[in-house]
Image (cartoon, rainbow, N blue to C red):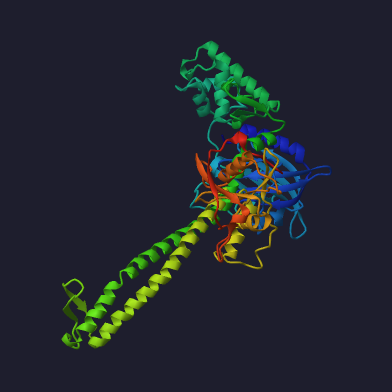
Amino acid sequence: MALDAATLSLTGRELDARLKDARIDKIFEPTRDEVVLNLRTRTENFRLFLSARSGSARACITQETFENPAVPPSFCMLLRKHFTGGRLLCVRGIPDERILFFDFQCTNEMGDTVINTIAAELMGRYSNLVLIQKENKANPAQEGKIIDALKRVDFEDSEVRQLLPGLLYQLPPKPVKASFLDTSAVGVVAAVTQKELPVAQALIKVTGGVGPVVCREAAYRAFGPDEKIGTELNEEEKMALVKTIEQIQTLYRQGGSPCAVLVDGRPVEFSFLPLTQYGTQAEHKTYASYSALLEGYYAEKDKAERLRQKSRELAKTVHNLYERAVRKAAARREEQAQSEASDQLRIYGELLSANLWAIQKGARQVTVTNYYDGTDVTIPLDVRLSPSANAQKYFKDYKKKQTAARMLKDLIAQSDAEIAYLETVRYEVEAAQGEAALGEIRLELKNQGYLKYYKLRDKKQKPADFLRYRSSDGFEILVGRNNTQNDRLTLKTARGRDWWFHVKNAPGSHVVVLSEGKEVPDRTKTEAAMLAVVHSSQSAGAKVAVDYTQVRNVWKANGAKPGMVLYDTYETTYITVEEQSLPAAVK
């Protein structure tokens, strides 16, 4: 669900109480829709998270850590210019609007004290962060001029309201609705009874300031699971709805209670009041603060979306490289087929040599008897060449085709190896767990010549460690995160008597059981094979084939791509992954 005005207002009150007088220490923009402000007070440090992402727009204090881009985006640089060192004066909202204003006392480039504001407009797909500077102190009702917006809105995007540098900031147009929280409960119910709709839908139509979940909750508390129509309510039912709305309004004025509804351990709804409409079919969880509520509801979803955003460009690049390699292999196979059909050229040359006496100089073609099968064949001729030169030309073309056929055999093998390698890279990008993992993949592609390397921009990063697990029998199991790690694990870290696992004929991680000179039990081998499936493109499959052998039977061919190895004297097992049987991860 989207963050409604009521919950946002209570979140703003909470942020104002906790962050007032805090100073901005650092500013980051992890993704194009998110900003993190590091704030410090005399006693505590906070991370204020502002998200303008359409599906998870919010403002809250976060405990999450973020991987920031090496080069700050332009909006981040603008924020740093105008807000670094600023002191938070207040966090304020507007009744029934999904907007929070963060007012900071800052110093401009001339050394003057100014009031700079971040307007967090958290309105679903219209969510935005707008930077405002107040110039007219005599008019407190006027917000000021726009410095810039995270998502600029010009005249083509909206004729009603533009968000461009230099324009006066204006509030978005407000629909004409009664406030659910500020209008008297009697007045709300009177409006509901004019609608020939179920009460919950009627509340959504006639009131503003709360989301659909609160309207459904009001109807459920008043009438239970029964659906009542607004125009058909009797006096008793009207009084029950009035009482329920008054209770919700009172709870809101008291600060509410941040609650979420969980189904199978995952939050599906949240609000500032307990949601009884789900009954005992779902788990109800109360949070210590609204920031904790928003973090708990959105964190996992945002983490996946953040990684998807960062990996999208790399995934597109790898996909294009893969498609190009496939097209190149197809073209080479087609050329090989043509080269293998070159015997006709040799036969033409032989027939011309045997019939030179019958060919007139300057002729465009000649018909002779093919002494291989006794049929007549017409051979095209180059009028500029003599009969003998035409014969030699066919022999020369035949030799070229034969040479090309031999070379194409090796080139096709190289193309097939490149396709197999890029398939593993595609899997790596899909399975990457963070910006560091994506950075290692980019570095791998640069080292292989697929991407350009920029010495000034590309900083050398410390390689990440292997994924580590402990088997039920106490053996350490290592898993490579990418092709470069797979090579390092198999060819440098592992020893000859260690056991090596990999899914058969599919992209995946190398998995090694460190034997330490001991016999490795079958149970540990099965657990390692399960990890090989989990960390592969076949993780959703049943009865997945996994090859395993001792490391001494694994080697790398000269010139092979990262992660590509050869092995012999191996066995194959067929694995169905059982979550409860997977070995424990070692942190």
Along the line of sight, the residue nearer the viewer: 289 or 383: 383
Q: Is residue 127 above or below residue 155?
A: above
For the residue pair 534 and 305, the one nearer the viewer reads as: 534
Say which residue appears at 49% left-offset and 15% top-offset.
233
- Residue nearest the observer in this picture, 142 or 384: 384
Residue displayed at 81% across by 42% down: 44
**Residue 256: where, in percent of width, then height?**
68, 27
Instruction: Answer with left or right where residue 67 lies relative to residue 354.
Output: right
**From what the image shows, is residue 529 above or below residue 353?**
above
Q: Position of residue 530 (x, y in %)?
A: 58, 41
Residue 543 x, y percent position in the rendering: 50, 40
Q: How many marks?
A: 0
Residue 255 seen in the figure:
yes
Answer with the quarter of the image where residue 339 lies. bottom left
Q: Which quarter shows the C terminus?
A: top right
- Expressed as whole percent of the image width and height from the top left, the position of residue 441 reads 60, 57
Residue lying at the far top in this picture: please name it.
Answer: 236
Residue 96 shows in the view: no
Q: Is residue 229 left or right of residue 386?
A: right
Kindly identify the residue that appears in the image at 26 percent across and 84 percent down.
Answer: 390
User: In the depicted view, which residue is nearer to us: 462 or 186?
Assistant: 462
- The quadrant of the picture occupied by the N terminus is top right
| Residue at figure coordinates x 75%, y 60% from the top left | 110
In the image, taking residue 538 as reference, residue 103 lies left or right, namely: right
Instruction: Check the image and name the residue furthest to the right.
Output: 42
